Image (cartoon, rainbow, N blue to C red):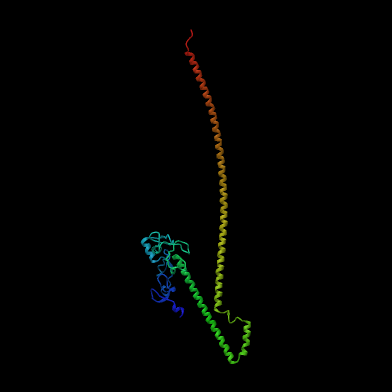
Amino acid sequence: MSSASTTALFACSRCFSRHPFEELSPGEQLCKECRGSFPVVKCTYCRSEFQQTSKSNTSSICKKCEANVKAYGKPTACEYCNIIAAFIGNKCQRCANSERKYGPAVTCEQCKQRCAFDRHDDNKKVDGKLLCWLCTQSLKRALARTKQHLSAVDKHKHRSHKSRSSHKDKRKSDMMKSMNSGDLSLDSQPLEKKSKLNPLQGELDPNSSDHVVAMTQLKETIASLQKKVQQKDNELLSKDKLITELKAQHHNDTTELRNEMKNKERMNETKFNLMNTKIQNLLKEVATLSKSAKKNNKLTKSALANTENSGSGTDSPSTN
């Protein structure tokens, strides 16, 4: 049985035609014909993919989030997955349901955030890893792209192999005809000359599709690498400019700070000298005041002594 017959087919939700699961849209399970020219976009809040249904309405918010915004207002960031989809409380609906089913959150092996939930089932793991919802979606998309690329490469190789085998069969039939007709001796010499001149003619054909595809791929990779090199050079130049600007700014800042420090030191020295002169003047005034106070004390004491002596002379009795 062929691989196409063994692959499971799934029905489109609109026209009910059967297609492989990779060809249907992940949100509404629509085929390419039903999708038409409407792109598949990610919701700005819950980050889930959905199909736009009309060209007039090009909003990037899914229907569930629109209803939740109308009912509860704009959401906040979830405390687990950091997706801005927490309409009620601090958790989004996806994390709240997972926590209710599978218990508390654990660290994701890809993004190293505490936003994964262990379902205790190895079949639910992606490539044997316990991942959060965002990492599982991105990894599944990457695996689907690699599968599509490998299938396209296999188809191309199969077609080229068929063309080569048919070409070889034609050559063999021509050789058999020439041998039967008896012209082998005449045709063998030019064939030998051709084989000597180009011994790899039957194996490598420069006009084959494989070489053309390989050359185009190499040219595309070279062009992309050259673009990356130019981008890196531009980034390095911009970083060098930033470094020079920052160095100049740092030099200016240091010179300004040094000037300010010198000015402050000068101001402090002048203030210190003024305070010292004031202190010296005050000390001199204190000394003069203390001297004058001592003199006044002496004068008052002498005056009191004189008054006492005069009073004692008048109060003494007469000797007559």
Residue 267: x %, y % from top left: 55, 42
Q: Residue furthest left?
A: 71
Identify the image quadrant of residue 35.
bottom left
In the rendered view, does 155 fall on the left or right side of 66? right
Residue 92: x %, y % from top left: 40, 62
Identify the image quadrant of residue 132.
bottom left
Q: Residue at x 55, y 86 (%)?
A: 170
Q: Residue at x 54, y 83 (%)?
A: 165
Identify the image quadrant of residue 239.
bottom right
In the rendered view, does 10 fall on the left or right side of 233? left
Quadrant location of the N terminus in the rendered image = bottom left
Q: Residue furthest bottom?
A: 181
Residue 199: x %, y % from top left: 61, 81
Residue 78: x %, y % from top left: 42, 60
Residue 182, above or below 109 = below
Q: Residue at x 53, y 25 (%)?
A: 294
Residue 276, above or below 153 = above
How many numbered circles are shown? Answer: 0
93 and 248: which one is in front? 93
Q: Residue at x 56, y 68 (%)?
A: 225
